Amino acid sequence: MEQTFDTVLSTYQQAVERRLAASFTDETQPQRQLFEAMRYSLLAGGKRIRPVLVLEFCRLCGGTWEHALDFAAAIEMVHTYSLIHDDLPCMDNDDYRRGRLTNHKVYGEAQAVLAGDGLLTAAFSTIARADAPAEVRIEIVRTLAECAGEEGMVGGQVLDMAGEGKTLTGEELLAIHSRKTGALIVAACTMGVLAAQGSEAQLQAATDFANALGLAFQIRDDMLDVLGDAKKLGKAVHADEKKNTFVSLYGLPQCEAYLQAENAKALAALDAFSDTAFLRELTLRLASRDF
């Protein structure tokens, strides 16, 4: 019997939640408050899109998605660390994330910095201990490090901060978000292919899909800052009005057209795979999401 989109998504999300919930639980350690702070943000909910992409691309490429759960957990640890640090007073200075107080509001700035540091480093030890061939683990470590580091997400954050108070061009905005948002989505999709030991052609198709999906995701995010409901989003709206966003540069109607064009690119990239109904539906839902 064919499973519905919602059933598959729930199966993936619940598996990821169980794997994450098993992390950092040792109450006997003297630094247990650090573990508590790490778990506070890691288990705060969210769509879990990046780990879901890891699992689904593993399945698409002939792997057993359950065997990729450590890799899915690792990318969510990296994503969560980035959110903790993004929310700090020295960065975006946000009070709420996923409908609850941000980490530094609960545990203090120093502990929040260290909770993020802990999650980042734990991600790589999680990959290193995964039940997979050594060459697979090495490639996944390399991929995640490159996409999350100075050439990817961290580099994008630096460009974002450097652009504050300036009027950026479309090319400059793309340079930021292809790194800050898009790189970790590329990591998720390609990590799934690597977990299944997929082909070079599959890696390229997954990269093409992820690049388009990541851009569409960011455009929709910028639109929701204007159109969204703070209760649904779990964070403040109109927080980016003084920042460089796709909406401030292009306006809402052009953003919608831009979003649909990137969505079409993402869907076209999936032609390299078979049995893509889940990913196609996920792509469409992310484009129209209201949270």
Image (tube, helix red, strand yellow):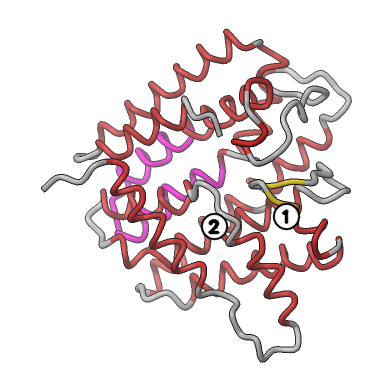
Q: Position of residue 205 (x, y in %)?
A: 35, 38
| Crowd rating for badge 2 (residues with CA inside 10 Å; few <14, some 14–19, many 20+) | many
Q: Amino acid at mark 2?
A: Glu
Q: How many marks?
A: 2
Q: Quadrant of residue 159?
A: top right
Q: Position of residue 70 (x, y in %)?
A: 44, 68
Q: Quadrant of residue 197?
A: bottom left
Q: Position of residue 52 (x, y in %)?
A: 41, 51
Q: Find numbered disc 2 in the image and state the secondary structure of the residue it sits on.
A: helix
Label at residue 84:
1
Q: Is residue 275 left or right of residue 215?
A: left
Q: Position of residue 230 (x, y in %)?
A: 67, 33
| Between discs 2 and 1, the one toward the N terminus | 2
Q: Measuring 71% from the left and 25% from the top, which residue is drawn there? A: 172
Q: Amino acid at mark 1?
A: Ile
Q: Main secondary structure of the magenta part?
A: helix
Residue at the disc numbered 2: 76
Q: Measuring 86% from the left and 22% from the top, which residue is drawn there? A: 166
Q: Is residue 78 left or right of residue 102?
A: left
Q: Measuring 59% from the left and 31% from the top, which residue is drawn there? A: 218
Q: Nearer the viewer, residue 22 or 147?
A: 22
Query: Was residue 191 drawn as part of the magenta stretch in this picture?
Result: yes
Q: Find numbered disc 1 in the image and state the secondary structure of the residue it sits on.
A: helix
Q: Is residue 94 left or right of residue 245?
A: right
Report the magenta residues as a range: 183-211
Q: Measuring 20% from the left and 46% from the top, which residue is drawn there? A: 3
Question: Disc 2 versus disc 1: distance between alpha carbons?
Answer: 12 Å
| Crowd rating for badge 1 (residues with CA inside 10 Å; few <14, some 14–19, many 20+) | many
Question: In the rendered image, is residue 41 in sight?
Answer: yes
